[in-house]
Image: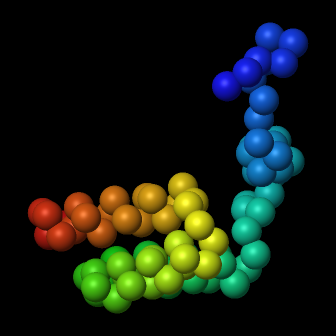
């Protein structure tokens, strides 16, 4: 990453969330879909959660929250917790 005036650039989304206090910059429909994925994970419906995650990833691309959900699914599959 290239520094500008000795400072690393910060994505606009991070400024909006961290500095301006927004909960998220995602549309509410996407937030709801992510929430449903986590509900499925919590309910041990891991196949359903993975399918929903794959669909959402196809719609919005890579997202840190989808990576986190994917890790939780893998963890539950491996250790059952």
In the rendered image, which quarter is residue 41 located in?
A: bottom left
Q: Relative to 27, is 75 on the left or the right?
A: left
- Measuring 82% from the left and 46% from the top, which residue is drawn there? 12
Residue 48 at x, y = what percent?
34, 88
Quadrant housing the C terminus: bottom left
Residue 30 is left or right of residue 25, and the answer is left
| Count of numbered badges drawn on the protein | 0
Q: Position of residue 9 (x, y in %)?
A: 78, 29
Considering depth in this image, is 31 or 56 the residue closer to the camera? 56
Q: Is residue 24 above or below residue 41?
A: above
Residue at left offset 45%, top offset 77% = 53
Residue situated furthest left in the rendering: 79
* Image quadrant in which you'd find residue 68: bottom left
Colouring convention used in this rendered image of the protein? rainbow
Q: Is residue 19 above or below residue 27?
A: above
Residue 55, position in %: x, y? 50, 83
Side (left or right) of 63 relative to 73: right
Choose between 17 and 59: the one closer to the eye. Answer: 59
Tell me, yes or no, if residue 64 can be seen here: yes
Q: Is residue 39 visible?
A: no
Quadrant occupied by the N terminus: top right
Q: Give the residue drawn at x 45%, y 59%.
A: 67
Residue situated furthest top in the rendering:
6
- The x, y position of residue 32, in whole percent, is 62, 82
Task: Indicate the quadrant where residue 28 lies.
Answer: bottom right
Q: Nearer the viewer, residue 7 or 58?
A: 58
């Amino acid at each position: 990453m290239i520094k500008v005036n000795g400072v690393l650039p910060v994505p606009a989304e991070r400024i909006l969330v961290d500095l301006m206090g927004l909960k998220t910059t995602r549309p509410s429909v996407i937030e709801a879909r992510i929430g449903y994925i986590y509900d499925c994970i919590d309910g041990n419906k891991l196949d359903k959660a993975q399918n929903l995650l794959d669909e959402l990833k196809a719609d919005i691309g890579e997202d840190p929250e989808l990576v986190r959900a994917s890790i939780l699914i893998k963890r539950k599959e491996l250790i059952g917790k």
